Image: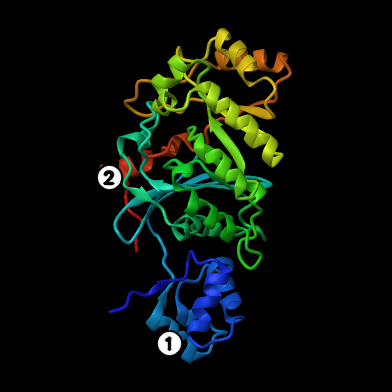
């Protein structure tokens, strides 16, 4: 039996090709795009402006995949909702929706697990299972739309900061961004998409060549190779000098400021000396610094610095005229660190969502 073609994940020109192979007009592709990405409909029988015969043809030849929600937690501290989703092969990924007033941001995963083994990341314990398909990346965003259903344009920003290293899955990432920005769908500008990377340097140039002008956030987290290699093993392959040089080129090629993410960890990278060195090593790069007070993982070895230490670190950067913000982790009470919800669900600490 011939496998059905999954329409979720096909670019418009590919969908047109599939439609014409059924002997139908190209414009039918636009109707399908609207149903799938604007209305979030996966059932052909509900696509009421399509002829019954056409819907039957689609049922026989195609499908519209959808991740299955199996757990959800809503923060009592802030407007954050974390969702655990399961693919047809049983693999589980995490997505977080954050209502920030004018900004309604969705944090999506790009892989099931991760292979990079960062010392402070809960996902590291999972290991890498597989890359997510473009349709699975987009579907995470579609799952969050009802959370923001009181807004005409529900999702304004997408950040690829969930499970996985996005630049290891660049083909599917770029395809997903092209689908997210479809006017017939979610219409999210690629300028409103941010990719967070641990520093897969060779992919920086390729990402720039895609011409999408996606914002790049680089997880820096240390000011010396010694400390960064302890926290992030990828630094043994692409050290700080190479990483900073590639970041500078990306910023200037795409005319976008790179964000350097810096997770502040008590006694590891939060000293005055670190702050002064951070100013020095990022000097001349079009960038901003995003300080992230560490979101402690239960049983983990790292802790968050005191509020005074965080404020002092920021002040040193501010006094040197750096653009710096503090991003307090949202959803700390619901296990918002990447990998926590999956780990809790796997341990049967959370009730699953009723079907």
Kindly identify which numbered label has been placed on residue 48: none
Residue 153 is situated, as x and y percent measured from the top left of the image, at: 66, 59
Viewer-proximal residue, 270 or 103? Answer: 270
Look at 36% across and 43% down and name the residue there. 113
Q: Vertical placement of 58 versus 148: above or below?
A: below
Front residue of 184/72: it is 184
Residue topped by disc 2? 346
Residue at disc 2, secondary structure: helix
Q: Residue at x 44, y 35 (%)?
A: 333
User: Residue at position x 64%, y 14% from top?
Assistant: 280
Q: Quadrant of the C terminus?
A: bottom left
Toward the top, the furthest residue is 273
Q: Is residue 78 visible?
A: no
Q: Tell me the crowding category of disc 1: few under 14, some 14 to 19, or many 20 or more residues within 10 angstroms, Cα based.
A: some
Q: Is residue 295 above or below residue 270?
A: below
Query: Considering depth in this image, is 168 or 56 the residue closer to the camera?
Result: 168
Q: Is residue 61 above or below residue 294?
A: below
């Amino acid at each position: 039996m011939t496998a059905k073609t999954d329409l979720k994940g096909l670019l418009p020109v590919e969908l047109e090709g599939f439609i014409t192979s059924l002997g139908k007009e190209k414009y039918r592709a636009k109707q399908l795009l609207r149903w799938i990405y604007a209305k979030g409909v996966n059932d052909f029988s509900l696509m009421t402006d399509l002829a019954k015969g056409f819907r039957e043809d689609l049922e026989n030849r195609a499908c519209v995949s959808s991740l299955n929600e199996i757990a959800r937690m809503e923060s009592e501290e802030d407007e954050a909702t974390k969702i655990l989703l399961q693919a047809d092969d049983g693999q589980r990924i995490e997505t977080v929706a954050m209502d920030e007033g004018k900004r309604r941001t969705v944090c999506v995963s790009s892989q099931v697990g991760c292979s990079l083994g960062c010392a402070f990341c809960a996902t590291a314990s999972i290991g890498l299972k597989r890359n997510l398909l473009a349709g699975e990346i987009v579907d995470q965003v579609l799952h969050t739309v009802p959370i923001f259903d009181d807004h005409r344009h529900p999702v304004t920003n997408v950040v690829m900061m969930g499970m996985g290293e996005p630049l290891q899955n660049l083909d599917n990432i770029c395809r997903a961004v092209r689908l997210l920005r479809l006017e017939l769908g979610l219409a999210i500008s690629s300028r409103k998409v941010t990719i967070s990377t641990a520093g897969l340097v060779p992919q920086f140039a390729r990402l720039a060549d895609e011409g999408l002008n996606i914002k790049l956030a680089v997880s820096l987290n240390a000011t010396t190779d010694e400390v960064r290699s302890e926290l992030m093993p990828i630094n043994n392959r692409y050290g700080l000098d190479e990483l900073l040089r590639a970041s500078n080129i990306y910023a200037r090629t795409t005319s976008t400021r790179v964000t350097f993410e810096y997770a502040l960890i008590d006694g590891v990278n939060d000293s005055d000396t670190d702050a002064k060195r951070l100013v020095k090593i990022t000097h001349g790069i079009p960038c901003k610094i995003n300080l992230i007070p560490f979101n402690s993982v239960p049983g983990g070895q790292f802790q968050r610095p005191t509020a005074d230490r965080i404020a002092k670190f920021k002040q040193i950067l501010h006094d040197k005229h750096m653009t710096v913000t503090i991003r307090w982790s949202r959803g700390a009470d619901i296990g918002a660190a990447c990998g926590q919800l999956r780990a809790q669900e796997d341990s049967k600490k959370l009730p699953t969502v009723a079907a």
